[in-house]
Image (cartoon, rainbow, N blue to C red):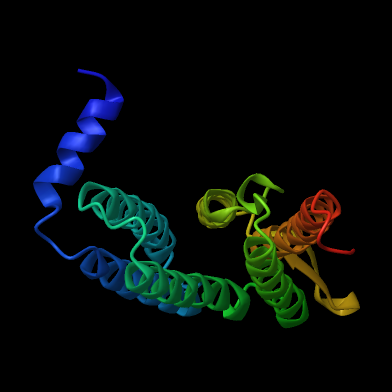
């Protein structure tokens, strides 16, 4: 049996469940993951729980999309709207937790958070123009999640092996943690994704004779 057949069988076995249920659970999982960032510097095992919750959120999201397909509701506006609302709430709670972590410089975190929001907005503008923006740029949902997981894992290992900070000099007020590195990468990659998505929108509009860029 191929992986595609296994995926279809899995979704069909769960199609009696409203797919919005999976989105709600994914939202609650994301809320908990975001909350764990606050105290993870005191309870280091929370970093591992954050990774587990982020992977669970991806699994729930994948399940919701496949159940929608198995129920033949790909064109259901209500399913799309509810899915997108819960999905973006989930994203914001995770990114918000990343930002307010006690090991993340607030200003770095704020820039990363705002960049992600602008990236979402540009994505929706691209969708409105019919642009295939989903493949544009490294900071798709999976890319963002992998970046956060790798950052959290690096911070956990930093505690484990006594390398909590990449730079540590309190006299010069120069402290830079693995979380800071992660959020700086988030900022840079989100900006790159914004650029690539705008370029995709421009191409889509330029190819449409009825529109003007």
Q: Residue furthest front?
A: 210
Left or right of 34, for residue 62: left
Q: Quadrant of the C terminus?
A: bottom right
Q: Is residue 46 depicted above or below 197 in this figure?
A: below
Quarter of the image that includes the N terminus:
top left
Q: Residue furthest top?
A: 1
Instruction: Give residue 6's quadrant in the image.
Output: top left
Percent x, y for residue 155?
A: 57, 57
Q: Is residue 98 above or below residue 196?
A: below
Please indicate whether residue 200 sits to the left or right of residue 101 in the image. right
Of residues 93 and 201, the one drawn nearer to the viewer in this rendering: 201
**Spot occupied by residue 109 in the image (x, y as percentages of width and height):** 70, 75
Question: Is 129 positioned to the left or the right of 208 in the image?
Answer: left
Q: Quadrant of residue 185?
A: bottom right
Residue 165 location, quadrant: bottom right
* Residue shown at 29% from the left, 28% from the top: 4
Relative side of 194 to 50, left or right: right
Q: Nearer the viewer, residue 92 or 86?
A: 86
x and y percentages locating residue 42 in the rendered image: 46, 74
- Residue drawn at x 76%, y 65% is 176
Q: Position of residue 137 (x, y in %)?
A: 71, 48
**Where 27 falls versus 195 (above or below)?**
below
* Closest to the observer, 207 or 177: 207
């Amino acid at each position: 049996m191929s992986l595609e057949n296994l995926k279809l069988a899995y979704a069909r076995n769960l199609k009696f469940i409203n797919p919005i249920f999976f989105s709600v659970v994914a939202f609650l999982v994301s809320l908990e993951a975001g909350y764990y960032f606050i105290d993870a510097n005191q309870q280091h095992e929370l970093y591992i729980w954050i990774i587990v919750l982020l992977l669970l959120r991806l699994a729930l999201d994948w399940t919701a999309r496949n159940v929608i397909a198995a129920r033949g509701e790909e064109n259901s506006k209500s399913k799309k709207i509810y899915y997108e609302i819960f999905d973006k709430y989930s994203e914001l709670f995770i990114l918000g937790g990343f930002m307010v972590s006690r090991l993340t410089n607030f200003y770095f975190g704020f820039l990363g958070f705002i960049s992600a929001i602008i990236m979402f907005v540009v994505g929706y503008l691209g969708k409105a123009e019919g642009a295939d923006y989903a493949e544009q740029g490294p900071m798709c949902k999976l890319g963002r999640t992998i970046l956060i997981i790798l950052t959290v894992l690096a911070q956990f290992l930093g505690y484990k092996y006594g390398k909590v900070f990449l730079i540590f000099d309190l006299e010069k007020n120069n402290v830079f943690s693995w979380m800071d590195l992660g959020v700086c990468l988030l900022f840079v990659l989100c900006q790159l994704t914004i650029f690539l998505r705008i370029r995709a929108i421009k191409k889509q509009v330029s190819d449409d004779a009825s529109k003007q860029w």
